Amino acid sequence: MEGSRLINGEKIDLGVCYYPEHWDRSLWPEDLDRMLAAGLRTVRVAEFAWSQLEPREGEYTYEFFDSFLDLAQAKGMQVIFCTPTATPPAWLTEKYPEVLNRDMEGHPICHGSRRHYNYNSPVYRKLCRNIVERSAARYGRHPAVVGWQLDNEFNCENDTFYSESDTEAFRLFLRERYGTLENLNRAWGTVFWNQTYTDWGEVYVPRKTNTNSPNPHQQLDYYRFISHSVCTFAKEQADIIRRYCKPGDFITTNGMFGNIDYQRMKAESLDLLMYDSYPNFAYCLDGYDPGDPMKDRNWSRNLAEVRAVSPVFGIMEQQSGANGWNTRMEAPTPRPGQITLWTMQSIAHGADYISYFRWRTCTFGTEIYWHGILDYSGRENRRLREVTQVSDKVAKLREVAGSRYEAKVGILRDYDNIWDCRVDRWHERVESVSQNGLFVALQQAHVPFDYVYLENPLTPEELGRYEVLFYPHASILTTERAKMLNDYVAAGGTLVMGCRTGYKDQNGKCVTDYLPGLAAQMTGTDIPEYSFVPPDQGQSMVDWDGVQVEAPVFNDLLSPVGDGAEVLGVYTSGYYAGTPALIRNTFGKGRAYYFGGAFPPATASVFLRKLGIAEPWGNVVTLPAGCELAVREKNGKRYLFVLNYLPETAEVTLRTELTDLLERSPVSGRIEVEKYGVRVFSLEKSRQP
């Protein structure tokens, strides 16, 4: 993005989502002036405005967005322009009903909401290419435009597709993947329940079955196919825009949703990814969990996922008001300070651009309760005052721009296992416990971490940035990924794996090797037997050198193999009490741990302490579990963000002198962070104790 006016490593910018089509034109100048006065210098427009550009097929009108963009330029406002393909207009779906998505039983997803199309309709692809080209040709060189958003929230609302066009495209996808029906039948194990195919015309996207259990190997490939469909759809649009946009203008899309390989999409189509961050979902009345220790802090987990795809990223929609459609998602107005907290949460995790959703709250449609900075009347309010104060704070963080989040602990991920969790309830049960448990434990022990995707080959040096890697339940383990892990451990790394590792191949079929399959040699482990924790047994417990830890959901019963394998823990409950539950194996210069259970928060916390990675910044700052510590680094300087999610003041101790970037003063010793407050400190790397 060389030459970009936004997200360029020089400053952190604020913006806002705006819908000029929702408001009388007489309001535009006033709205833009008020945005600029509040420090909001970029607006996103047009993602749902197809009819403003093509009100009828083949009839184009540019006056509306010409007027708005010319006004934005005159005011000094930058614009992110969107392709409007998330909401095909009524004339299109009426004339070409084949563009509509269908549910699993074949019922059409009708016009009247959004994201009602399917990616594989040839006529929809053609019409999308046309509207994207018309938009890019008209506005690609406009001085106000600094970037382009593809569509809006790919796979939001619905991430499965069952139209006739999808079946045709699925067959083509499978032909390219397997070549022959013989290979397909073998990969899917179609001899089971007499599912063998003798003609490609017999193959469909998954359909409703008598047991409501489609072939799991077909289902796994189906999720891969959906991702392929989204990625090719995005690439078509990106390729067109690049022919017209100015040098330095970026291409992005927003949000993270299911059944998409964002690593592939980023590599093929995007300069960076943008996320839509709504921490207030933690307080939705229909899903509020008062026992969740993380609540809005859970969005740090989502931001880590974004960062794993796009180390340089922004926020396209940042929470600024209450959430709610007229049908669902009721949530309260952010409390005083929370807009600031959530903005700084995004910045702490690496975002250099924050765009609030939205400027004015819409007075009509499904999202009438999805509030923005301003309410319906547009009157001055507390939220606008807080956003203006955020702008002042962000200006003081200019030097933070371009810095990267710093972590020495990683959680390994790959899409094969993510999608297998949707297919396999056994896998999903352990994975959900461990993903939540590791996140909670890392957060409460103030351990900055990254998600690390193994979609592309990573060298031992690249993985070696991390002192410890967790790969909790790699049920599908490929030869390529096993080699990466072997090389990492052999070079001196520490790897922790959990139950149900290595028992499937890439098609989701169970292997006939001794378990844990491809991980056996590295972990020094054999698994003669395994079981769900019997429901009449109670909690499964493990004694680890005198410390009792939980091993919930599922237990692999272990046996050490080789001279380097050492039993560290044994089960203390159930018929297998006394059986090894935790093995540490010396492998090359490193160590591999195999734990026979899942990782709930308490168990994950013990691992952090035993491995010596809890509180890695404890010699610089100590803080309560209710506060998050995030660290960014650039040019030998570290930036420490302390975020207080608690409804009361938190006491923090600085054990060395730091610079408070917001107060522009040196500080040390005991300090207070107000409720929902944020403090940002800088520390020269050479001065770190």
Image: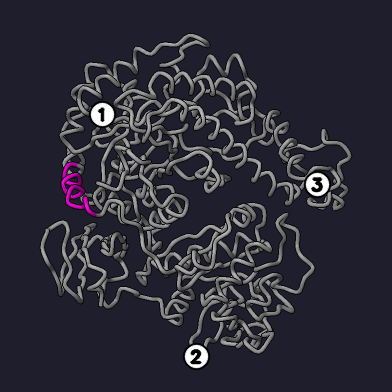
Q: CB atoms at circles 3 and 1 under 8 Å apart?
A: no
Q: Residue 221, how many percent across, how many down?
A: 70, 47
Report the front residue among 31 and 194: 31
Disc 3 marks a residue whose amino acid type is Leu
Q: Residue 81, how many percent across, how many down?
A: 38, 28
User: In the rendered image, which quarter contains the C terminus?
Assistant: bottom left
Disc 1 marks a residue whose amino acid type is Tyr
Which residue: 73% across, 77% down? 529
Span colored in magenta: 388-399
Report the front residue among 147 and 83: 147
Label placed on residue 432: none
Nearer-N-terminus badge (1/2): 1
- Circle 1 crowding by C-alpha within 10 Å: few under 14, some 14–19, many from 20: some
User: In the rendered image, which quarter contains the N terminus?
Assistant: top left
Q: Which residue is mark 1?
A: 376
Q: CA distance from mark 1 to mark 2?
A: 61 Å
Circle nearer the viewer, 3 or 1: 3
Q: Residue 668, how many percent across, how many down?
A: 15, 72
**Which quadrant of the view contains residue 104?**
top right
Query: What secondary structure is marked by label 3?
Result: helix
Q: CB atoms at circles 2 and 3 under 8 Å apart?
A: no
Q: Which residue is mark 2?
A: 546
Left or right position of 528 against 131: right
Q: Is residue 359 magenta?
A: no
Query: What secondary structure is marked by label 2?
Result: loop
Left or right position of 570 against 549: right
Depicted 473 relative to depicted 150: above or below:
below
Q: CA distance from mark 2 to mark 3?
A: 51 Å
Which residue: 29% across, 20% down? 68
Q: CB atoms at circles 1 and 2 under 8 Å apart?
A: no
Depicted 473 relative to depicted 528: above or below:
above
Label placed on residue 184: 3
